[in-house]
Structures are given as structure tokens and as C-alpha cells.
Image (tube, grey):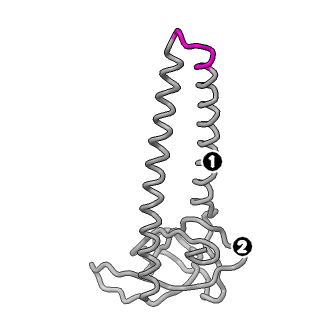
Amino acid sequence: MVQSLVRLDSMSGVSHAMTSQLAAENKQIDKKKAEIRRILNDRHASAAELAKAKEMIAQLNDKISTMEQDVARLTGPDGKNIIAPSAGSGTFTTREEGDKSFTAKVPVDFQMAQKKNVAFAFTPGSNFQQGNYTIQIYQNGFKIGEGTRELKKGGLFS
């Protein structure tokens, strides 16, 4: 349990760092866009300034492509459940959505109107995709909880 809390704190730090990095990237992009607009709106812009604007546009397009690849990598899973035979994967019937597959059954100390943390460990198969996964908790066929976590190959610090 302590390891899980340490990992969660570490992930919160990583998330904060990524948010700060994204804000800095957006600030740089906005600065370049403003410079490009200034040059393109200047009717007396020199050929050198127009060439500079063209180069900045190419740089922005490269940055956008890189950011799109990063977003795809961070959100990369195909929407399918992780099948982990060692965790007892199978199917169950929900009250609202019919049959659904699940990764693992985990005993949960359920108490009405109380929020509780739920944790479990498993080893995914070799076809595991990195990215953000949605964890759903069901009780008697009703969804009672949901959360999203980023899962990576090779552990937290690889």
C-alpha cells in the first residue's frame, strides 16, 4: 500500500511537470504565431522577413506534428480491456450495458456514500499498450466508481 501511495505521489509530480511543460510550449507557440502575424501583416516586409516567417511556420508545423505524436502516444490504448489470465479475467452482466469483459475481480469494502481508494496489481500480457486506461468499479451490475490512470511498460521509473 505504501508503494502505491509513493507511486501515486510520483505520478502527481510527473503530471504537474508535464502540465508546466505544456504551458511553456504553448507560450512559445503563441509568441511565434504573434511574430508570424506581425511579419505577414506588414505590407512593407522585406524578403528576409518573409523568409523568416516561412521558416517559423515550418518550425511550428514540425512542433505541432511532434505534439500530435506525443498526444497519440500518451492516450495510445485501443479501448479494449486488458486481458490478464493471472488476475482472473472474464465477463459479467451489467444492469445498463449488458455483458462486459473485465480484467480482474477485486474485493472492495463497499459502504454507501463513502469514497474509498481501490488498488490492485497485475502483470499485463506482451500485447499491452501504454497509455491512459479507465478503471471502472461495478457492484451487483451497477457502475459505482470510475477513474483514469496512465499505465506504462517497464514500471514507473523506466
Image quadrant where one finds the N terminus? bottom left
> Which structural element holds mark 2?
loop
Q: Which residues are magenta?
A: 43-50
- The location of residue 113, given as percent across then percent down, is 27, 78
Q: Residues within 10 Å of mark 2 (few under 14, many from 20)?
A: few
- The location of residue 85, given as percent across then percent down, is 66, 86
Which residue was labeled with disc 2? 127
Q: Is residue 135 magenta?
A: no
Which residue was labeled with disc 1? 66
Q: Is residue 130 above or below residue 28?
A: below
Q: Residue at image x 63%, y 15%?
A: 47
Point out the tag, 2 or 1, that comes first from the N-terminus: 1
- On screen, residue 116 versus residue 75, left or right, reads left
What residue type is disc 2 on? Asn
- The location of residue 143, given as percent across then percent down, is 43, 73
Q: Residue at image x 53%, y 18%?
A: 40
What residue type is disc 1 on? Thr
Q: Is residue 49 magenta?
A: yes
In this rendered view, identify the residue nearer to me: 105 or 38.
Answer: 38
